[in-house]
């Protein structure tokens, strides 16, 4: 069971709860006074699903981004850097792709609150969509930092098919807009972008809160962290986390439960009785389907390329095919490359007798090169391939920090 503590310096008795422990929280949830429950989730609730959080030393996402050769870890979530070099984000996106991970018992607990007609709104910092996958209705979820649920072109704003994007990410391709050729990005809030309108449009509801449950977040990122200040003074606030966070513990009816979120929500359901724990386990069992689905998706997509590359134009694809054909013919004829002279950079070919297989193969290559379409000078800009070699300097960070 989680360790029950209160913030140092507050010694007065609780005013709404009977005590500052898990049993008192359970008793309050079952009372007629608890009707509107709000939940705030951070990356800590998804770590047991296998998704690393952002800031944990050595194991967080930022600590493992060195292989992407970023100027600094946060650059992977900066919109200006993404415009210059989308490859690092797409590499990371493959690790965070929805469907690859199963919701945790904590996510199923949020669904259980909804089933019991207690959940009013779930605010989440996470972009993994595990709340939706656990069955929490979209209308009851505010994805404060966006998610993989939708995606758009960053140039013209056109939507993009979710399944197509997923397949391209798994294949190691950078998605481009079908309309203008611009870069496609999931609707994840980057540094330099505004939070979703739903976040701002719903925060007024917190004034009606009877209970606020905060789980798996350090409460260091604003404005998300500021939501804890918007509930009434009389509203009990419960923090379920590995470490103390924010100012929770400073009010009379604050409860801080330290430990793993999955374990603590199970303990809470035990205290609640009335089949809460049985229903929680049943809801979590329903999420087993996502594990097998991802296995099939991985098989269908095959092994992703080690180095991601933008999609090629038809001209570039044909050129690659011609080069591959030339290479294969060279191998079959055992042609060795020789150093180019000052006046001739071509690789000399052996003498070919007319009508021989070697001559016929050579003609096929020459014909393919001769018929290769030439792109006119005024070709559409959407056909250009993004230059992925120029990282930018630090961009402006706004309220939407991850």
Image (cartoon, rainbow, N blue to C red):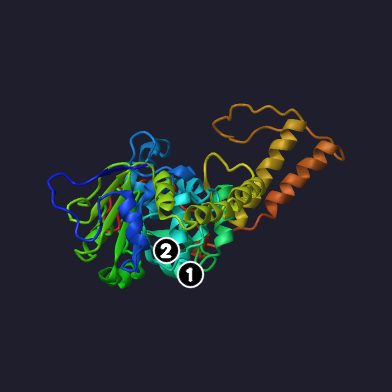
Dot 1 falls on a residue whose secondary structure is loop
Give the labeled residue for mark 2: 154
Task: Note whether residue 128 is visible.
Answer: no
Nearer to us in this view, 204 or 281: 281
Q: Nearer the viewer, residue 276 or 69?
A: 276
Residue at image position (43%, 50%) is 270
Mark 2 residue element: loop
Q: Percent x, y for residue 300?
A: 67, 49
Q: Nearer the viewer, residue 199 or 284?
A: 284
How many numbered marks are there? 2
- Picture coordinates of residue 146, whole percent (x, y): 40, 60
Around disc 1, counting alpha carbons within 10 Å, would you say few (fewer than 14), some (14 to 19), or many (20 or more)? some
Q: Quadrant of residue 371?
A: bottom right
Residue 69 x/y as whole percent:
39, 38
Residue at point 38%, 44% (across, down): 53
Q: State the image coordinates of residue 399 (x, y, percent, origin top left).
A: 26, 59
Residue with the mark numbered 1: 158
User: Quadrant where the N terminus lies?
Assistant: top left
Question: Alpha-carbon distance for marks 1 and 2?
Answer: 8 Å
Q: Are marks 1 and 2 in contact (CB under 8 Å)?
A: no
Q: Is 63 displayed left or right of 315 in the figure?
A: left
């Amino acid at each position: 069971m989680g360790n029950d503590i209160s913030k140092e310096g507050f010694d007065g008795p609780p005013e709404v709860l009977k005590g500052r422990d898990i049993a008192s929280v359970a008793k309050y949830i079952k009372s007629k006074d608890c009707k509107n429950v709000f939940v705030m989730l951070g990356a800590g609730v998804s770590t047991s699903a296998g998704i690393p959080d952002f800031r944990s030393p050595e194991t967080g996402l930022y600590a493992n981004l060195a292989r992407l050769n970023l100027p600094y870890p946060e650059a992977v979530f900066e919109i200006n850097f993404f415009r210059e070099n989308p490859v690092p984000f797409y590499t990371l996106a493959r690790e965070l792709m929805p469907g690859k991970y199963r919701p945790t018992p904590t996510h199923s607990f949020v669904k259980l609150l909804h089933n019991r007609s207690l959940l009013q709104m779930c605010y989440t910092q996470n972009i993994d969509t595990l709340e939706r996958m656990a069955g929490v209705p979209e209308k009851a979820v505010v994805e404060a930092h966006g998610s993989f649920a939708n995606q758009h072109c960053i140039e013209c704003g056109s939507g993009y098919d979710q399944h197509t994007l997923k397949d391209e990410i798994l294949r190691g391709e950078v998605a481009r807009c079908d309309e203008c050729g611009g870069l496609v990005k999931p609707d994840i809030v980057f540094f330099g972008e505004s939070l979703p309108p739903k976040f701002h449009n719903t925060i007024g509801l917190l004034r009606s809160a009877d209970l606020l449950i905060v789980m798996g977040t350090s409460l260091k990122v604003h404005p998300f962290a500021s939501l804890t200040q918007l509930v009434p003074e009389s509203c009990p606030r419960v923090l379920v986390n590995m470490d103390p966070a924010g100012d929770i513990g400073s009010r009379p009816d604050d409860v801080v439960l330290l430990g793993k979120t999955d374990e603590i929500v199970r303990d809470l359901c035990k205290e609640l009785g009335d089949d809460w724990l049985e229903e929680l386990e049943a809801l979590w069992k329903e999420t087993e389907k996502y594990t097998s689905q991802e296995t099939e998706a991985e098989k269908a997509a095959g092994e992703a390329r080690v180095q991601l590359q933008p999609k090629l134009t038809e001209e570039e694809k044909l050129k690659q095919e011609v080069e591959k054909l030339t290479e294969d013919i060279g191998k079959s004829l055992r042609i060795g490359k020789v150093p180019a002279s000052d006046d001739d950079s071509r690789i000399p070919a052996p003498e070919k007798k007319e009508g021989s297989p070697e001559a016929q193969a050579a003609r096929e290559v020459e014909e393919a090169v001769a018929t290769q379409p030439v792109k006119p000078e005024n070709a559409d800009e959407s056909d250009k391939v993004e230059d992925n070699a120029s990282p930018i300097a630090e961009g402006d960070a706004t309220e939407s920090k991850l």
